[in-house]
Amino acid sequence: MLNPKCVIQSFLNVILVVLLTYAITFGEVSQPASGYNPLRPMSAQPVQHIDLTMHDQTRNRHIPLRIYLPSNTDSSPIVLFSHGLGGTRKGCTYLGNHWAARGYVSVFLQHPGSDDSVWKDRPAGQRMAEMRKAASPQNFLFRVEDVAAVLDQLTRWNQMAGHKLHRRLDMSRVGMSGHSFGARTTQAVSGQSYNLRGVQITDARIRAAVILSPSSPRRGDPADAFGSVRIPWMLMTGTKDVSPIGGTGLASRLGVYPHLPAGGKYELVLHGAEHSAFTDRPLPGDTRTRNPNHHRAIIALSTAFWDAYLREENTALAWLEGAGPRSVLEGEDRWQFK
């Protein structure tokens, strides 16, 4: 005859296993007592996006935008994103969707001259050469100016009755992010110093930056380049993060963090992650199978960072500087902050 207590205990054990499996699958395990979880959407409503093109009259330049909107219609913090060389506003959708699901208006820029127009109509044998030409100082400056122009336009749209973005943008809470060439763009507008006379680089409207595949300057002292950064930076790279154009590798990427001022600086190094780990799909020349946990880690840490520094949420900062990151990282991933 079965012991009723044993039956009940066995049933409870099964329930416990099911609950733990659910928690691991949906990122709910190892969370702080506060219950803060950057992987959890703030609403069950699907994220919507709109595609717009703004015209910078000063430069007679059209800048395509993809804007991911939270389900609420309140005034929300903004995150801008700058794509890598040869990319478009349609890249890194996993970030745009999640950040918007967490309540951020996510504005993905497309930079003419260093977007997909560089390669898409070229014969396959010419594409790399065209990409190398597009990675120019001139296009770098165009990108920096694009960021300022977009922020100006967002301010106008926010004040324009009848516009889709009317009163939806909290222009006092702006974050900046980007990958590869977009990382260089982000570093420039977020505080990196350059010896460029008469050119304004840093944009004071940006309050925090997430930089995917950062890089150190090819010339000059990194301490001079990064010592004047005045806002929080989160750097993300991988142990196999080498740029297909230019060959920028791990030494350059790891050379940024040591020279940033202490306080609000963070660095994630994903084990085995190639340059494409931060994008939606593999790149030509990739040699490793993509690790699905990399996107999960990128989403969780970047979201907690925005929550901590754009929304000033203490629970997010406690998660970020406590046990939170290790709950989404794997054993050989490296994480540090100061």
Image (cartoon, helix red, strand yellow):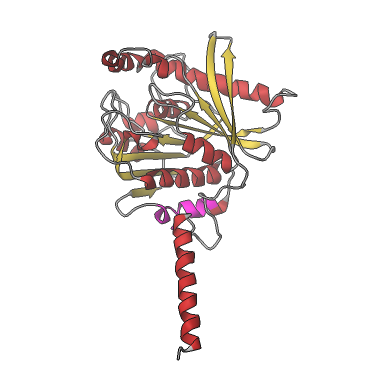
Is residue 124 visible in the rendered image? The answer is: yes
Name the residue at 67% across, 23% down: 157
Q: Quadrant of residue 213?
A: top left
Is residue 321 found inside the magenta-colored segment of the image?
Answer: yes
- Give the camera-side residue of 231 and 108: 108
Name the residue at 54% across, 8% down: 60
| The residue stretch that appears in magenta | 316-328
Q: Quadrant of residue 188?
A: top left
Residue 33 x %, y %: 53, 63
Q: Quadrant of the N terminus?
A: bottom left
Residue 338 x %, y %: 41, 47
Residue 8 x %, y %: 50, 81
Asked if 157 appears above or below 254 in the picture, the reply is: above
Residue 53 x %, y %: 57, 18
Is residue 293 found inside the magenta-colored segment of the image?
Answer: no
145 displayed left or right of 87: right
Name the residue at 51% across, 51% down: 317
- Give the camera-side residue of 156 and 64: 64
